[in-house]
Amino acid sequence: MTLIFTNARLIDPEAGTDTPGTLAVAQGRITDIAPQGATVIDCRGKCLAPGLVDWGVHVGEPGARHKESYRTAGLAAAAGGVTTFVTRPDTTPATDSPEALDFLRRRADSEAPVHVHHMAALTRNRDGREMAEIGFLMDAGAVAFTDTDHVVRDTKVFSRCLTYARSLGALIVGHPQDPGLSKGAAVTSGKFASLKGLPGVSPMAERMAFDRDMALIEMTGARYHADQVTCARTLPALERAKKNGLDVTAGVSIHHLTLNEFDVGDYRSFFKLTPPLRSEDDRLALVQAVADGLIDVIGSMHTPQDEESKRLPFEEAAPGAVGLETLLPAAMRLYHAGQLTLPQLWRAMALNPARRLGLDCGRLSAGAPADLVLFDPDAPFVLDRFTLRSKSKNTPFDGARLQGKVLATYVAGQPVYQREAA
């Protein structure tokens, strides 16, 4: 399709601008020359931005298709303005072989209306004992390697994985949480955890694990991304690592940027996450770190859980929340609070993850893929979790008043979602 978006508010994270303008699309890519005979779309002053790149999505295929399939995840992504998502390898069995990865690629290509890329397991079965076939998995299309929340306890095994990854230029994604301190924890330790009688974990569990990983990165020279930095105490170590020239980036989930430990309230299991929600001081420090560019990536950490997994006592409930469809409106909380601008948000939700993963998207410049989201940042609504397109409905924003509606999503210039007129 050839398209011309007129009367748009263009959010360009690469230039850091938020300006009125016109955008042209031809042959699936953005062009600076208006094509002849193009379909004109009047944006009516609404925002047009690169489609979101959501890094760290869990899809239940194989092993838990009843929680999420590539079809439902793709529909949720399109409705949320996510034009590319990157899956985690915490499937059953784990995505630790080229054959398993090829199966997932074919499923995603046939079922999802958006782009899907895949991370692979760092060790076989994510058990931290034997390195996976990193080279063959890269050839099969893996964009990064991680054992997700199964932290590799054996430092020698992890260092060997990093050394081998360094020789191939592979990106390693770590989960900075000390597994011993974190075991059995449901919330962040402190007065609130004690009052609720819930097992807690100190924020130092994150800092200690991050320090270990940075020492190994300094030793091996590998490329490293921390999937979730959630505590203010980790930020100075992250800043030092970057200043020392280590090839390190960090991400944070939208839930840790917009919620805090008190949202658990009366043992509401939709707010049980891994890592757990932190203090308000931590949340504010994380928001500032995103504004300063210290934290590079914001993601949903989409983790679908069925009703049977969540309708349990808080301590026993499965952790995680869906987020593909709520990432954008949740991020608008930070925009409307005056804490982050739209270009800053899109730098972290589109440009930076695309660049770190070597993907050619997340931009509005000529030649970039026409993966776009048209949205109204001011449109208010009350979220009803049963309207979500994900199979699982475990969102902490159920019943919340939000602002920011996706009006249309385009992949390679083709509409994959259009909101029905009210």
Image: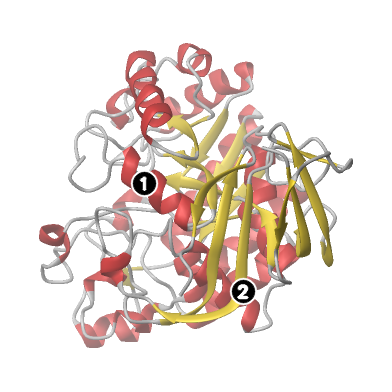
Front position in the image: 257 or 338: 338
* Residue 157 percent coordinates (x, y): 41, 25
Left or right placement of residue 263 versus residue 66 in this view: right
Looking at the image, can residue 115 be seen? yes
Front position in the image: 61 or 95: 61
Say which amino acid is labelled 1: Ala
User: Label 1: which residue?
Assistant: 73
Instruction: Locate the C terminus and report the quarter of the image it occupies.
Output: bottom left
Q: Which residue is located at x 89 percent, y 40 percent?
A: 33
* Residue 364 percent coordinates (x, y): 77, 48
Identify whether 325 is placed above or below 351: below
Q: Residues within 10 Å of mark 2 (few under 14, many from 20)?
A: many
Label 1, label 2: how far apart the Cα atoms are: 23 Å
Q: Which residue of the protein is positioned furthest toward the front in this rendering? A: 37
Nearest to N terminus: mark 1 or mark 2: 1
Which image quarter: residue 105?
Answer: top left
Q: Which residue is located at x 64 percent, y 41 percent?
A: 413
Name the element at disc 1.
Answer: helix
Q: Residues within 10 Å of mark 1 (few under 14, many from 20)?
A: many
Identify whether 105 is placed above or below 296: above
Q: Which residue is located at x 43 percent, y 33 percent?
A: 155
Looking at the image, can residue 272 be seen? no
* Residue 204 percent coordinates (x, y): 45, 63
Left or right placement of residue 319 versus residue 410 in this view: left
* Residue 307 percent coordinates (x, y): 14, 61
Q: Which mark is residue 377?
A: 2
Which image quarter: residue 268?
Answer: bottom left
